[in-house]
Amino acid sequence: MTVDEYRDHVLALVSPLAAEPVALDELATAAPARRVLAEDVRSLLDVPRFDASAMDGYALRGADLLSATPDAPVVLRVVGDIAAAPSAAPSAEAGPPGEAVRIMTGAPVPDGCDVVVPVERTSTRRFVPGAPLDERIEVYEPSRPNIRRRAEDVAVGDLVAAAGSPTTPRLISAAASAGHATLPVHRVPRVAVLSTGSELVPVGTAPGPGQIPDSNSLLLAACVRDAGGVPVRVGAVPDTAEALRAVLDDVAPHVDLIVTSGGVSAGAFDVVKEVLSGPQEAPGGPAGGPSEVRLVAVGMQPGKPQAAARWRGTPLLGVPGNPVSAYVSFRAFVRPAVRRLAGHPEPVEPLVERVAAEGWRSPAGRQQFLPVRFVGPDGVAPVGPGAHHVSALTRADAIAVVPPEVEAVGTGEVVRVMVIA
């Protein structure tokens, strides 16, 4: 299968999770940093809620300033004071011509006043806390209105944000201003991650002969977190069908997606392949076995062997055990699945165009995923020998994605990349 064909198959296994109301405070402070709106959000309030002063100054009738000049300023009597506070209430109407009201930014403008003159454009120059109210002021020129009109930003019923929008800090602020205390967002995906291999030992444990630390389950868990999901890290599972089935049976009812690493190739002890190749769950029959199984070779390098299925109805994706292959497979297939579960309308993130600062070879007929580093303002170059080693990921800024029909990338050619955050 091509990369696009297999990704489409993976995305067909998952659907956006149900909506739940979440408080704005939690959306602003809790992980993951951004959720996705499940429904359109419309304003419950006019924003601004009333005609408000856009600055500190004096509210008055604009007609009073028509003759004002620096040499012949207009003199106005100050008859009141309005602060931007809950107790501040505008008078029912403005006073007679020739009067002004001191007003602070955000305070309601009195009825009849159509101009707020900035304090620095009057004889007062600036307001001093605690200073008495000037009885009279001079204004030296006509002024712009400097008033934020009621509902000029958003009116009741206006669309604040559409379904599918991420809950950015800006959206959270706009929703609060529009009168919302909660937002309807898709549930955060819970994703179980596990590594297969009897040679794996917990991190921090001294490996014995033939043993290696279980780094892949940590890698995948961190990738799930970065994709906006909640990782449920199972850790390493021995290379026995019984052990893997037991773990899958235990975790499947409690998560939205299962991701395994290792055991999907053609080896004699590839346990994921063995378990998924076993008896399939009959339609309507007892839960517990695999269903909708795809064990495929994808035209890509690295990451050729892939697995997709359901276990007890829960989608399961199996990626290769090599860390670079596992990471590339996650970015190409698992991350889009997590994003679809989280409600993103475009689960496949666009690639970024860069220029090859130096050339490299690419395998014929296979889509290449090559760790690259940034060079200069817009260039990329391979990280060097050993791109299949896990250390290449620590040196890489992005993954170059080369189409299968391209056998060589030349210096100066445009190449598309997945940026590594």
Image (tube, rainbow, N blue to C red):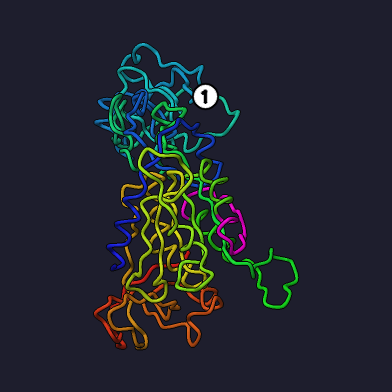
Amino acid, disc 1: Leu
Identity of the residue drawn at 46% across and 67% down: 264
Q: Residues within 10 Å of mark 1 (few under 14, many from 20)?
A: some
| Left or right relative to 268: residue 53 | left
Q: Using the image as rendered, state which of residue 170 and residue 313 is in the foreground.
A: 313
Identity of the residue drawn at 24% across and 31% down: 66
Q: Which residue is mark 1?
A: 133
Q: Is residue 122 visible?
A: no
Against 327, is 339 above or below? Answer: above
Q: Using the image as rendered, state which of residue 155 and residue 218 is in the foreground.
A: 218
Q: Give the percent coordinates (x, y) of residue 173.
A: 44, 37
Q: Is residue 38 visible?
A: yes
Identity of the residue furthest to the top in this view: 92
Q: Give the percent coordinates (x, y) of residue 308.
A: 39, 57
Identity of the residue drawn at 53% across and 79% down: 389
Magenta-colored stretch includes residue 238: yes
Magenta-colored stretch includes residue 239: yes
Count all numbered tags in the image, as a single digit: 1
Against 366, is 154 above or below? Answer: above
From the image, which quarter does the N terminus lie in? bottom left
Disc 1 secondary structure class: loop
Q: Using the image as rendered, state which of residue 318 and residue 115 is in the foreground.
A: 318
Q: Give the percent coordinates (x, y) of residue 77.
A: 41, 21
Identity of the residue furthest to the front in this view: 279
The magenta stretch is 227-244
Q: Using the image as rendered, state which of residue 138 and residue 230 is in the foreground.
A: 230
| Left or right relative to 140: residue 321 | right
Tell me where residue 119 sits by quadrant: top left
Q: Give the percent coordinates (x, y) of residue 409.
A: 30, 85
